[in-house]
């Protein structure tokens, strides 16, 4: 490693002020600090500092996404073969290598495009604005492909990523300054710009769209319960068609990373154990979803409302949203009390949108985006309570 | 029986190099200095010139805006230099010390039979006043103000902090006399913050005429700011004065002996010290007299006057700070750390962290040799909730820091800036993932409010 260190130091003048490649200073800086924690020391105040840094924090999130990613690749492969063969009853745990390799071939380019476009824009932006490249996109770059349907064209991934990084983040000042979640911004952009390709009622299943073979999802079928021509026969019909255990394990069509609640929970365990993800948000998000689900059960005026509340937690992007999207510390509520309200309504509104809004079968994305916007307001009231306590003390004294 | 307040939030940073409980006499330094920079916000008005001879207790300069506050020479000798910095700001007044001390004769009243006014002017005239600090702002107390209470914390929870039970053992009379002096300075009570986690020395347990409250918990439970917040929080327009436990004994000693003898016992600590222990020194002594020959020289060393969280960076040629009860010597961290072996992707078995991102949280008793590397790069705030875990105040730390950064005075006031000092944020600065210099931000916020509103 001494060799690498020496080479880096030798290159440093080239990229420093006055050097030949000074314009690329921040690119050099990003790569150098990626390989080595810089030799910067403290000057006053706290002379010693915690070992934690943003790179480690972000890396843990990427690590937590791996189960969902791996499973997503496999699941992609499976539904591709289902579509190919036209056989709905194709055994799930069969031809595993083929399925995985197919998924890998499909998903890897999306990841490459997402990271390539996102980091490219960040590099350019940071050079223009003269600030170092921050780590935020390490996570966003992985999240973006995971919330996309697998057959989305690569150029759309690129455009969505560019939109999300530019409008979602850089205009606000970069990592830590954004108002709404980057990955959800990317998805929302596609959702509204190319609605025919992104709406959640049917998803592509890999390779066969020409035949119009689209895999229905639980949410799509559930939505149809409200229409004049339901695709399933009431609550029993839909519960027969989608076994809760399949939905929990993720053996259903859907966006790449979101189908498996189990994979999300493994990620959640890592996030909670390391303290990177907020347990408060994840739990209250789930509770919010459950509470609203039960509320609809109690009202029960149509078939959709009568779907068991727990199903909402394991279908669609609910678990993925709760674990990886809602917990984004920059866009979530920042106070401890605020996090509980934020999570509760995030989960609740997701179910609310699913059940009541006929236009959007999947409500998680919109619900989290909405709560991102509301988070500062929640924090405001939590903090105001603290301020009022202080003012009251002043009056008493 | 005093009540105990137990604090759940906080963090003990476990460093190698705790001082052993033996005391040595530090060799007399050749140079001593009184540095106006030790007193935040002070503009000095010189009372001596280069070449003047001074005794211990001779006034050297006063506060330009409050001339009753004087700063005296800690030793006898000759003014060797008045060091100036940018814009001719006075940085330090250096004294070349005589071989032994002669003392100014101080006429101090007997604290048990005098009026409050007499005691106050005696403390001012003797040069002891700078030992009394005030909240808000963490500066020398303004004698014009009426403090609602005076607080003394009898224990220090900072990393490698000196143990006042040891330092002040057998100094019961001096400590009590100091408390008696302080009692004249406030219409309110003198509060002692007791250590609820250990059996304390008689010096503290036998103290009379004070309100005792016990505190237990991790650092910063021993910070006087935390203790004030949980017993008698400061509202806008109120003042609380604070005095360090050893300084109380020093005030008592000067009143008992009539001599300006401010010798104190400091702990020489840190992983780079070969035999960490206590030394008796006069404040302002040249650092070399304490540190030279006592360090391992295993790596480049950082000498800190004070503790590792809020001390000032010194060299062997600079001086011990006026208030400091501790010198910490740590390895410099000016080496790059490769990501896989020591950096952010490493297993990190020797990386101390309050987060659970490194496996060291599994070893709650291990002690660490931490260096001064920033361990990361300056970033915007991203992670939430980490500051709150080490900040035992009913205050939102991140919001207050942001208010200070954006210079929003109203918001700072509302969020409780008057109750905090930069040292209370030292742990926040330590744990901050984004490596923001939080103590500087809070200090800047306090300075702004002082300038605009007082």
Image (cartoon, coloured by chain):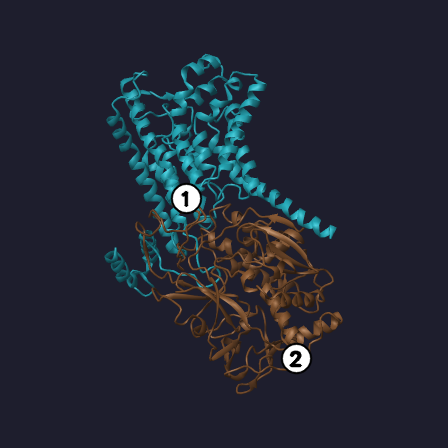
- Horizontal side of residue A75 vs B127, given as left or right: left
For the point 53% across and 84% down, which residue is it? B77
- Horizontal side of residue A244 vs B250, given as left or right: left
Depth-wise, is mark 1 or mark 2 nearer the camera? 2
Q: Which chain is cyan?
A: A
Q: Compared to A309, does B295 lie above or below?
A: below
The picture quadrant where one finds residue B401 is bottom right
Residue where numbered disc 2 is placed: B106
Percent across and percent down for residue A251 are 36, 23
Q: Chain of mark 2?
A: B
The picture quadrant where one finds residue B405 is bottom right
Q: Chain of mark 1?
A: B
For the point 27% across and 18% down, which residue is it? A85
Q: Compared to A142, does B441 lie above or below?
A: below
Query: Relative to the observer, which residue lies in front, A79 or B118?
Result: B118
Residue B307 numbered mark, or none: none
Answer with mark 1 or mark 2, whichever residue precedes in sequence: 2
Q: Which chain is brown?
A: B
Q: Label 1's element?
A: helix
Q: Label 2's element?
A: loop
Percent across and percent down for residue A132 are 39, 55
Q: CA distance from mark 1 to mark 2?
A: 57 Å
Residue B362 numbered mark, or none: 1
């Amino acid at each position: 490693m001494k060799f690498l260190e020496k080479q880096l130091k030798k290159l440093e003048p080239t990229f420093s002020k006055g050097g030949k490649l000074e314009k690329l200073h921040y690119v050099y800086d990003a790569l150098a600090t990626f390989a080595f924690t810089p030799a910067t020391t403290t000057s006053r105040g706290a002379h010693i500092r915690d070992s934690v840094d943003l790179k480690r924090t972000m890396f843990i999130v990427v690590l937590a996404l791996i189960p969902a990613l791996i499973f997503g690749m496999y699941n992609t492969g499976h539904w591709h073969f289902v579509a190919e063969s036209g056989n709905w009853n194709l055994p799930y745990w069969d031809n595993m290598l083929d399925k995985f390799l197919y998924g890998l071939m499909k998903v890897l380019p999306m990841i490459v495009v997402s990271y390539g476009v996102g980091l490219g824009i960040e590099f350019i932006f940071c050079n223009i604005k003269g600030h170092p490249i921050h780590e935020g996109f390490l996570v966003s770059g992985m999240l973006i492909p995971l919330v996309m349907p697998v057959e989305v064209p690569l150029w759309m991934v690129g455009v969505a990523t560019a939109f999300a990084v530019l409008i979602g983040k850089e205009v606000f000042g970069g990592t830590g300054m954004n108002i709404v979640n980057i990955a959800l911004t990317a998805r929302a952009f596609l959702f509204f710009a190319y609605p025919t390709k992104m709406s959640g009622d049917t998803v592509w299943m890999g390779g066969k769209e020409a035949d119009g073979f689209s895999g229905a999802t639980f949410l799509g079928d559930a939505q149809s319960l409200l229409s004049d021509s339901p695709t399933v026969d009431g609550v029993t019909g839909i519960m027969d068609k989608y076994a809760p255990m399949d939905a929990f394990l993720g053996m259903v069509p859907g966006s790449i990373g979101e189908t498996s609640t189990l994979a999300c929970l493994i990620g959640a365990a890592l996030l909670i154990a390391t303290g990177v993800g907020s347990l408060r948000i994840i739990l209250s998000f789930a509770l919010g979803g459950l509470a609203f689900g039960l509320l609809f059960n109690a009202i029960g005026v149509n078939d959709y409302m009568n779907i068991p509340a727990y199903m909402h937690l394991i279908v669609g992007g609910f678990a993925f949203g709760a674990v990886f999207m809602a917990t984004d510390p920059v866009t979530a509520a920042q106070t401890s009390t605020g996090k509980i309200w934020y999570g509760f309504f995030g989960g609740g509104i997701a179910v609310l949108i699913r059940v009541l809004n006929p236009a959007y079968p999947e409500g998680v994305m919109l619900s989290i985006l909405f709560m991102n916007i509301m988070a500062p307001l929640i924090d405001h009231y939590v903090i105001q309570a603290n301020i009022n306590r202080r003012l009251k003390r002043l009056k008493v004294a | 029986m005093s009540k105990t307040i137990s604090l759940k939030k906080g963090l003990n940073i476990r460093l190698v190099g705790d001082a052993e409980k033996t005391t040595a006499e530090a060799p007399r330094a050749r140079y001593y200095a009184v540095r106006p920079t030790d007193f935040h916000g002070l503009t000095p008005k010189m009372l001596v010139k280069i070449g003047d001879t001074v005794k211990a207790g001779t006034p050297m300069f006063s506060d330009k805006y409050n001339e009753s506050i004087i700063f005296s020479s800690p030793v006898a000798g000759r003014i060797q230099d008045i060091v100036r910095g940018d814009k001719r700001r006075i940085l330090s007044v250096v004294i070349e010390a005589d071989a032994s001390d002669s003392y100014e004769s101080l006429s101090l009243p007997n604290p048990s039979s005098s009026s409050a006014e007499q005691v106050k002017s005696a403390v001012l005239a003797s040069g002891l006043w700078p030992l009394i600090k005030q909240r808000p702002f963490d500066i020398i107390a303004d004698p014009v103000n009426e403090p609602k209470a005076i607080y003394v914390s009898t224990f220090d929870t900072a990393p490698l902090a000196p143990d006042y039970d040891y330092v002040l053992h057998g100094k019961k009379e001096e400590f009590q006399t100091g408390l008696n002096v302080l009692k004249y300075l406030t219409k309110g009570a003198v509060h002692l913050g007791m250590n609820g986690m250990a059996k304390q020395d008689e010096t503290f347990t036998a103290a009379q005429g004070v309100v005792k409250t016990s505190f237990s918990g991790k650092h910063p439970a021993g910070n006087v700011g935390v203790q004030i917040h949980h017993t008698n929080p400061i509202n806008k327009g109120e003042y609380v004065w604070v005095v360090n436990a050893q300084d109380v004994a020093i005030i008592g000693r000067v009143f008992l002996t009539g001599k300006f003898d401010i010798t104190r016992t400091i702990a020489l600590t840190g992983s780079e010290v070969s035999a960490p222990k206590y030394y008796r020194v006069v404040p302002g002594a040249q650092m070399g007299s304490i540190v030279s020959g006592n360090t391992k020289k295993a790596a480049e060393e950082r000498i800190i006057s004070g503790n590792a969280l809020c001390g000032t960076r010194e060299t062997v040629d600079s001086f011990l700070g006026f208030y400091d009860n501790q010198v910490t010597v740590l390895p410099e961290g000016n080496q790059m750390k490769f990501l896989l072996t020591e950096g952010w992707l490493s297993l990190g078995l020797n990386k101390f962290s309050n987060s659970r991102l490194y496996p060291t949280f599994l070893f709650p008793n291990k002690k660490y040799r931490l260096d001064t590397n920033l361990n990361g790069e300056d970033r915007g705030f991203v992670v939430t909730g980490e500051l709150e875990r080490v900040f035992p105040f009913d205050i939102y730390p991140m919001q207050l820091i942001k208010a200070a950064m954006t210079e929003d005075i109203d918001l700072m006031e509302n969020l409780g800036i008057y109750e905090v000092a930069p040292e209370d944020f030292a742990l926040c600065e330590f744990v901050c993932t984004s490596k923001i210099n939080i103590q500087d931000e809070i200090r800047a916020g306090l300075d702004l409010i002082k300038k605009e509103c007082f």
